[in-house]
Amino acid sequence: MPRKRLTREEHREQTRCRLLDAAALSIARKGLAATSVEDIAAQAGYSRGAFYSNFDSKSDLFIELLRLDHQYIREQLQKLLDAASTEDMHKQLTSLYARCYRDDNHYVIWAEARLHAMRDAKFRERINALCLEKRDLIASLIEQFSKRVNVQLPGSPAHHALATIALLDGVLYFAMTMPNDLPGASAEAVLSNVFMRMFFGASE
């Protein structure tokens, strides 16, 4: 069966996707500062001109990469919000940290974004907007689960959500850099225990 010929828009989208995938790999391996436009284009199998036909700059591509990954994270968190029962949410909470990053590369990419945001105020504004949306989704999850188990947590759901994000990022960092001391299964078990104590311990 002959291959379907791509339309101009489909070809452009394919090129953008390949450039984004190449950027994700290169930035995760080398860091944002050490990754050049030429590195990304070569990794994707395109010319420098093809890069600039799709993105204005490396920063523009990086923002788009983060935006698309944030969309993935948002969809994963929405699945938790849509869980049909308390039992379903309990099971899903145990894998919350795995849902916040699709793989190790994307965790590193967000770590790079946070470092870059500390040095670039304009970039920080755009990253903070994504982080606040993530905070709000997790806050909704915490609030919904609290109501289902009839628990009133001290403080605001938004504050608990930020603490949850910090905990998830910290545990995942050690699971990646010290896997012998904190293997994935242990990290998941620890987080599950913390979340369950947050809700059920609060009522004791």
Image (cartoon, helix red, strand yellow):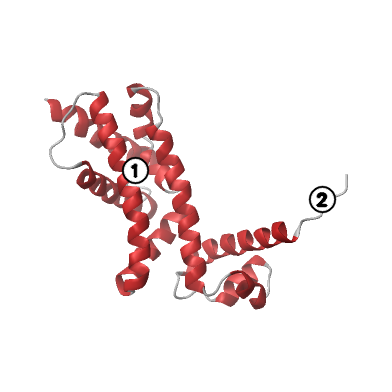
Secondary element at tag 2: loop
Report the residue marked by disc 1.
137
Query: For the N terminus, which image quadrant?
Result: top right
Q: Residue at x 53, y 66 (%)?
A: 26
CB atoms of marks 2 and 1 within 8 Å: no
In the image as oriented, which residue stretches furthest toward the right? Answer: 1
Q: What separation in Å lies between label 2 and label 1 (alpha carbons)? A: 40 Å
Amino acid marked by disc 2 = Lys
Percent position (x, y) of residue 44? 64, 66
Percent position (x, y) of residue 145? 28, 30
Depicted 90 relative to depicted 137: above or below: above
Depicted 172 relative to depicted 66: above or below: above
Q: Which mark is residue 116?
A: none
Tell me which corner region of the image, top left, top right, bottom left or bottom right, holds residue 93: top left
Given residues 88 and 74, the one toward you in this image is 74
Amino acid marked by disc 1 = Leu
Given residues 51 and 38, the one toward you in this image is 51
For disc 1, the neighbor class at 10 Å (few under 14, some 14 to 19, many from 20) is: many
Q: Is residue 104 visible?
A: no
Q: Residue at x 38, y 49 (%)?
A: 179
Secondary element at tag 1: helix
Report the residue marked by disc 2.
4
Labels 2 and 1: the sequence-earlier one: 2
On screen, residue 61 versus residue 123, left or right, reads right
On screen, residue 38 versus residue 184, left or right, reads right
For disc 2, the neighbor class at 10 Å (few under 14, some 14 to 19, many from 20) is: few
On screen, residue 171 versus residue 57, left or right, reads left
Q: Residue at x 68, y 62 (%)?
A: 12
